[in-house]
Image (cartoon, grey):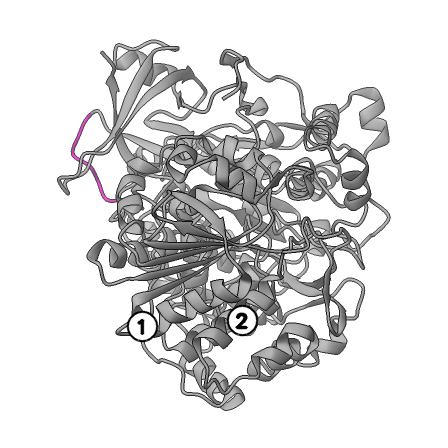
Amino acid sequence: MADDKPRYKSYNSPAGGWGAAAATAKVLLEQSVVTKGSRALLSMNQPGGFKCPSCAFPDASCTKKLEFCENGAKALAHEATKFCVTRDFFAQHSVSDLMAQSDYWLEMQGRLTEPMRYDAATDHYVPVSWDDAFALIGRHLRALDSPDEAEFYTSGRTANETAFLYSIFVREFGTNNFPDCSNMCHEPTSRGLPHSIGVGKGTVILDDFEHAEAIFLIGHNAGTNAPRMMTPLVEARKRGVPIVAVNPMPERALIKFTEPQDIVQMATFGSTEITSEFVHIKVGGDLALLKGMMKVMFELEAAGHTVLDHDFINEHTSGFAALKADIEVQNWRDLVAASGIDEAQIRRCAEIYIRSNATIVCYGMGVTQHQQGSQLVQQIANILLLKGNYGKPGAGISPIRGHSNVQGDRTVGIDEKPSQAYLDKVRDVFGFEPPRGEGHHSVESVEAMMAGTAKVFIGLGGNFVRAVPDTDRAYDAMRKLELTVGIATKLNRGHLVHGRDALILPVVARSERIETAAGEQFVTIEDSMSNVTASRGVLEPASPHLLSETEIVCRMAMATLPHSKVDWASYIDDYGLIRDKIAAVYPVLYAGFSERIKAPLGFHLDIPPRRRAWATPNGKANFLILPGLAVNAPVDDPDMLRLATVRSHDQFNTTIYSYNDRYRGVYNDRMVLFMNADDITARGLEAGTKVALETISDDGVARRVRGLTILDYPMSRGSVAGYYPELNPLLSLAHYDRTSGCPAAKSIPVRVVAMR
């Protein structure tokens, strides 16, 4: 950590604006890439350029503007950094020494430059040739008693071509064990929405924001996690569109925002008020809010007013009567208590929704990361169905996914529960019989490691062990493995918590050119609104010893499957051949892939609800019921608080760019607890006091994090927040959504304990 003393000071300026511009310039300077980075930023998210390696928000159809944000600039600067981790670095630092360093320190060391192998005798990583690295992987995988003893992780930065080949390699090897970063964020979308509307994706495209008459933002912080989303929100507010933000903690960007590309606002220090209605919900109170809004709608219908789209409901939906019965039995006292807001505000939200003829509901992990996150997503689908908010301009459901290709990876085969129809296509196209049983999601992977039934872990990007729940137990589980492989651009904790054998395999980054024997190659990315675009790096690779992710996957397959029926060598050089196979396995979604991807702005995948078609067993959109008002199991402890783990503004997933979180007024510290003043007083504590948090759990495992500084912050009563991944030790592996496997990181039952 920096020597600067921790400081806590309220941030009262608008988000964005000169603060964002200064932060962008600062990070380019810190990474010594002012000229190189500035040039690359001009190509980010532009036709002919590369896709941002951070968030998945789509690009504007107008290309005259710069299409990057502060956090995208940070991601690029850290990727293009002049700093490098060489063999000399590993010779100087043992793994034990590196393990004692912070996540921030590890990130700041720079780019990995050559493949490395762990040497147990010296506790150092040492150089290894690529051929020997692949041979080691092949030996370990072939030596397993069952293919199901291996776990194959995928990060959302992985491009479609690589993810597709990875899924084919792993299935030819013989398992469906695909723990994936989506398991930890929007898996409730992937598993919950298909039962409602027939597809596990959003139904909105970017142009819909221009036609929306109301926008609801539930459980996400666009200003930090998808800053480019602020542009359509600003434009909507300028048109007078009401924007309702629902969150346990107010976020600065959703209060006031200065658009950095608005010359007038920048010159005059002006700003736009984003939120017309801030709903200060308690953690988990979203279900009560949604049911309360629907109750208002049914009350008005009973009073003779027409607020529902009855034609749409009758023609396109099933289950309406059951939903109506569930809503009508709710009473206002319980709705108010469960939501944490008063009846008048619930009615105001309902009135905004009722007046709108085209409404978009956007949501993030504040919705999905609960024990019944999949069912909560379905309630958002319900309220949109009541007014026919699908298949018309300006309307629909919009999950705001945080990682650049996490949705695309799912589309092209990274799925531990593949459909039989997909497996049939894999068999027909590639000539082998894929495994038919379900594989492991992320939590199940850790459980298999703990049980000793998993022996090998291969991580295609990401920082798995730092992202999963129950940090201490996850560390112990990873250390039981026979082989761990980290395929990455930067050093991270996952390379230090390793198996008996371990490899670090460095890759070409998203912003860097990929040259093969067939010439320069490009990859494709699917954004959070189902648009597929090409991505071509523009920078020279950080080291001549890097390989592309695609080549690494192909060579792992060749080393593991000597008698494979797949022509892996051909895919190393020509990515067009991979796209042809994607089109063969997905003949509807990706028909004409090679031609369609030539369009400068790419193409949208077909999303049936946009046509008011429903790929459900009954051919209808379904109203689905979640009885009661709780999305998490009740806890019988009067001191219980619900902890939501959050990211700082200087963070992307587990990557820490600094110890500052300027919009929340935190500087030089990450060990803080955001807490309501009344909750602080009720426990006899004071702001600034250092405390411990402990999990309330009945599994017999003591989970505690010490040394958190209490900050008096406008949280809703009964709700607290702190930073991820530092507070992951408090999240039990057993505390997750059973439908999707997603850890309930936004609703951890904890108590505050004074430190002595």
Q: Residue 287: x and y, percent?
A: 38, 45
Between 385 and 73, the one nearer to me in the picture:
73
What stretch of residues is rendered in magenta? 630-638
Question: What is the secondary structure assignment of the residue under circle 2?
Answer: helix
Q: Amino acid at mark 1?
A: Ala
Q: Which residue is mark 2?
A: 555
Q: Position of residue 501 (x, y in %)?
A: 36, 56
Q: CA distance from mark 2 to mark 1?
A: 18 Å
Q: Which badge, 2 or 1, comes first in the chain's sequence?
A: 1
The reply to whether callout 2 and callout 1 are in contact (CB within 8 Å) is no
Is there any visible trace of residue 615 in the rendered image? no
Number of other residues with Cα within 10 Å of mark 1, as a class: few under 14, some 14 to 19, many 20 or more: few
- Give the residue displayed 54% in from the left and 71% down from the top: 555
Quarter of the figure with the C terminus: top left
Q: Is residue 82 above or below residue 610?
A: above
Does the magenta run of residues contain 614?
no
Residue at (81, 45) in percent of width and height: 42
Circle 1 — which element?
loop
**Secondary structure character of the magenta stretch overall:** loop
Residue at numbered disc 1 = 143
* Residue found at x 75% / y 49%: 44
In this view, the residue farthest toward the front is 121
Total number of numbered discs in the rendering: 2
